[in-house]
Amino acid sequence: MKAETKTARVSARISPNVYNTLTEASEITGSTLNQFIVHAALEKAQAVIEHENKIRLNKQSAGHLFELIENPPKANPKLAQAMKQYKQDLK
């Protein structure tokens, strides 16, 4: 039995100038217009996601973060209770 591959369709209305530019680029890369558009859109989507998942800190903020990691503040009563409850729930 052959495995079924599911796909989804995406369509867009574009100007003739955009169409001509995309067609030329796809021909240069030796791919179909659809392959070129999907590849370019996927690369851009991955870059956007990667950019959004990065944590950016300036030198001062990074120093403060590392200081808190190395020397965490004492747990306040609510946090201490939550940690106690969590440990009990694990049993």
Image (spheres, rainbow, N blue to C red):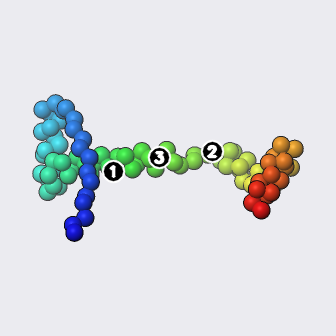
User: How many C-alpha atoms fall within 10 Å of the one at disc 1: few (<14), some, or many (≥20)?
Assistant: few
For badge 1, the amino acid type reads Glu
In the picture shown, does residue 15 fall above or below 28?
above
In the foreground, 11 or 40: 11
Disc on the earlier residue, 1 or 2: 1
Mark carried by residue 43: 1
Q: Position of residue 51 (x, y in %)?
A: 47, 46
In the foreground, 83 or 89: 89
On the picture, is 48 further left or further right than 69? left
Q: Position of residue 19 (x, y in %)?
A: 15, 37
Disc on the earlier residue, 1 or 3: 1
User: How many C-alpha atoms fall within 10 Å of the one at disc 3: few (<14), some, or many (≥20)?
Assistant: few
Q: Position of residue 34 (x, y in %)?
A: 18, 48
On the picture, is 87 further left or further right than 27? right
| Residue at the farthest front position | 1
- What residue would you read off at disc 2? 58
Residue, x 24% and y 60% (percent of image)?
4
- Which quadrant: the C terminus? bottom right
- What residue would you read off at disc 3? 51
For badge 3, the amino acid type reads His
In the foreground, 20 or 78: 78
Residue, x 32% and y 49% (percent of image)?
42
Residue, x 72% and y 53% (percent of image)?
66
Disc on the earlier residue, 2 or 3: 3
